[in-house]
């Protein structure tokens, strides 16, 4: 089932995900609604991670924190269940990626705190409305994501490199892309880098660390935005006993509208 064939309402999409009827990449799904990255940690690590997000608002813009013992994101999607309403989850244990699972039913404990972080998929509708092609949507694949040499600001036990997502943009549209995305600081905002992948530690743009490679055509520049997959790179670096995340490109879809988080 393609993104365009899915229901437009977030609650209806979440129901399809919850029942296992659909588990695809969420770019273009429920257009106009905010999507969120996910990071789940044991309660004793939650304060350190909260501080990490506050110190790194570009890759980790906080939308909501769900306290230990609760699974409902009451601010962004009342009635949803964070254990079942994401199309795919990843489990990191002691700094190792250990599993990708469709549900957290067998992995949930009541001491887990969930963090919802803004996602760049949320400004893609505004980019489309501005006449900017999104190559990963055109190709029907996931957005490419890369681990960079850009350091995050450490907090407590958490540190590591920033992850970025990339979209090829025609040179004459780059200023417009910056203007459009700057209005969405809650979902990563303006790009962190334009051009030269090597300058931020990306040796082969055709081989992303997460997601799928896309073509950068003549007359285009690769444009890089901070990415909410950063906590996964931080998990690999900092080696917490447990971190549960979304599978890259498989986001939690909230009830919030993009317009609700835009800055005029």
Image: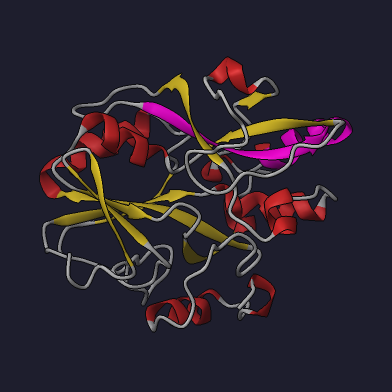
Point out the residue furthest to the top here: 199
Q: Residue at x 67, y 20 (%)?
A: 196
Which of 257 and 121 lies nearest the eye of the viewer?
121
Residue 80, picture quadrant: bottom left
Height in image: 105 above or below 50? Answer: below
Residue 88, picture quadrant: bottom left
What coloring was used for the rendering? Answer: secondary structure
Q: Residue at x 21, y 73 (%)?
A: 105
* Percent position of residue 163, x then y: 47, 34
165 in the magenta segment: yes
Residue 151, picture quadrant: top left
Q: Residue at x 46, y 83 (%)?
A: 21
Height in image: 192 above or below 29? Answer: above
* Percent position of residue 126, x then y: 73, 52
Instruction: Please identify the quadrant where the C terminus is shown.
Output: top right
Instruction: Please identify the quadrant where the N terminus is shown.
Output: bottom right
30 in the magenta segment: no
Which of 170 and 131 lies nearest the eye of the viewer?
170
* Percent position of residue 10, x then y: 53, 74
232 on left or right of 168: left
Height in image: 52 above or below 99? Answer: above
68 on left or right of 9: left
* Percent position of residue 20, x then y: 40, 80
Height in image: 142 above or below 171? Answer: below
Please report the bounds of the magenta region as a residue range: 161-181
Q: Residue at x 66, y 36 (%)?
A: 182
């Amino acid at each position: 089932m393609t993104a365009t064939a899915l229901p437009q309402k977030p609650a209806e999409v979440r129901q399809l995900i919850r029942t296992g009827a659909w588990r695809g990449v969420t770019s273009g799904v429920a257009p106009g609604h905010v999507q969120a990255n996910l990071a789940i940690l044991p309660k004793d690590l939650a304060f350190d991670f909260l501080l990490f997000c506050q110190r790194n608002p570009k890759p980790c813009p906080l939308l909501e924190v769900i306290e230990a013992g609760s699974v409902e994101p009451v601010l962004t999607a009342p009635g949803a269940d964070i254990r079942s309403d994401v199309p795919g989850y990843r489990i990191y244990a002691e700094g190792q990626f250990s599993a990708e699972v469709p549900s957290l039913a067998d992995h949930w404990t009541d001491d887990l705190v969930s963090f919802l972080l803004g996602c760049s998929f949320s400004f893609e509708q505004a980019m489309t409305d501005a006449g900017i092609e999104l190559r990963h949507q055109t190709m029907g694949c996931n957005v490419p994501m890369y681990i960079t040499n850009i350091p995050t600001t450490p907090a407590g036990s958490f540190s590591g490199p920033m992850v970025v997502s990339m979209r090829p943009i025609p040179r004459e549209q780059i200023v417009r892309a910056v203007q459009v995305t700057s209005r969405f600081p809650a979902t990563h905002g303006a790009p962190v880098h334009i051009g030269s992948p090597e300058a931020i530690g990306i040796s082969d743009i055709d081989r992303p660390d997460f997601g799928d490679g896309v073509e950068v055509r003549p007359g285009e520049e690769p444009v890089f935005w901070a990415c909410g997959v950063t906590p996964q790179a931080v998990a690999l670096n900092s080696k917490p006993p447990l971190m549960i995340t979304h599978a890259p490109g498989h986001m939690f879809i909230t009830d919030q509208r993009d317009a609700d988080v835009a800055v005029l």
